[in-house]
Amino acid sequence: MAGAFWCVVEDDRQGQPKKVTAELIGEARRWAGEVGGAVEAVWLTDRAAPEGLGQLAAWGASRVWLWEDAALAPYRGETWVPALAELATRESPRAIWGAVTSRHRELMARLAARLGAGIAADCVAFSLADGQLVATRPVYAGKILSRVRWTTGPWVATLRPNVFKAAEAETGKAPAVERQSLGVVTPATRFVERREEAQTGLPELTEAEIVVSGGRGLKGPENFVLLEELAGVIGAAVGASRAAVDAGWKPHRFQIGQTGRTISPKLYIGCGISGAIQHLAGMRTSKVICAVNKDADAPIFKIADFGLVGDLFEVVPLLTEEFRKLKK
Ligand SMILES: Cc1cc2nc3c(=O)[nH]c(=O)nc-3n(C[C@H](O)[C@H](O)[C@H](O)COP(=O)(O)OP(=O)(O)OC[C@H]3O[C@@H](n4cnc5c(N)ncnc54)[C@H](O)[C@@H]3O)c2cc1C
């Protein structure tokens, strides 16, 4: 029987799988339908809510391989990788997919190294050639799309959030859960303290369907409030350019680009951002790109679907006002 497609669960640390997991499962179902094999979820967590397990089944995971152990939080490669690698060696899945998130990027690279498998990181599409899966991934800061094929299995990959169609949930499916126990691991690092971020009420940057992003044109940290107001009205996440982050206006987790986060929202609105190649590397796969810049020659207008030449301090409050009216 063909090996299964494994989708490693990305969760909210509260016991619920995130939307990107539905995207992994949706894409895995598509290719399992073509080349054969079951679609299964693999979840390493300190807490798996029963509804979370039900959700995985509803999305179409026929089985959930579950490690639920306090030692798995927070994420550490040295605890997660051996567990996953051991199961993969025993079960020989055809593919193991994770999401392009901070911890999955590291996890999947380490797992591929441990298994002696190739990894296609940051995939934005798949196709088939001679019964083998071919992954498409942006390279050179997104200027070129490369197509890569694995020479050995399993097909280890990370998939960019918001690119693939999420699996539709079907009710009435119960999860077949295979509980796994964690072997004895003596981590070289010790967990000291976790500090929760203050909740902004805005969606998470990499998962958001709309992102409003600010750059040096904002002139100072206090002016991000303009973007936060707009974001609040349209349900967007807020991001930043490296210039804004380097200036200390926003923490690094807000940075979009080559050395920051990669996003693919349905709508990206860049305000006071010039559109340097390193910034584009993190957002050029957005479905619709809008830019507000007072310089009509700013490079961002070359890739923007809609451009507004103007002063963001006038334009952004007007946009917020108009969206507010529309929502009413
Ligand atoms: C190795 C490397 C990695 C990098 N990684 C990243 C990365 O991950 N992410 C990233 O973003 N950058 C990255 N950079 C930096 C990148 O090259 C740019 O320097 C940076 O993106 C510029 O940020 P910015 O667009 O905010 O600032 P600027 O380039 O200074 O642009 C500011 C823009 O604001 C406009 N503006 C000014 N005032 C207003 C106003 N009132 N209203 C409207 N518009 C206004 C200006 O016309 C200008 O276009 C990297 C660079 C290197 C070398």
Image (cartoon, rainbow, N blue to C red):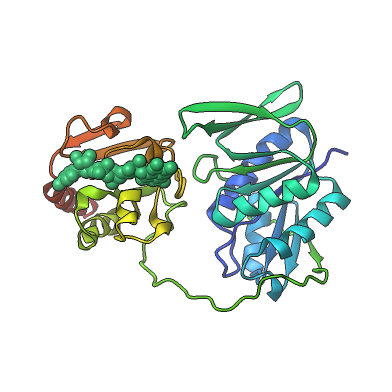
Q: Nearer the viewer, residue 145 or 228?
A: 145
Residue 263, placed above or below residue 297? below
Q: Nearer the viewer, residue 147 or 265?
A: 147
- Residue 83 locus on image (x, y percent): 78, 61
Q: Is residue 114 visible?
A: yes
Residue at image position (68%, 60%) is 77
142 left or right, relative to 1? left
Residue 124, placed above or below residue 77? above
- Residue 206 locus on image (x, y percent): 46, 51
137 left or right, relative to 306? right
Q: Is residue 257 visible?
A: no
Residue at image position (47%, 52%) is 207
Residue 76, placed above or below residue 111? below
- Residue 152 locus on image (x, y percent): 80, 34
Quadrant where the C terminus sits is: bottom left
Quadrant where the N terminus sits is: top right
- Residue 3 locus on image (x, y percent): 82, 41
Query: Ligand 1 quadrant?
Result: top left
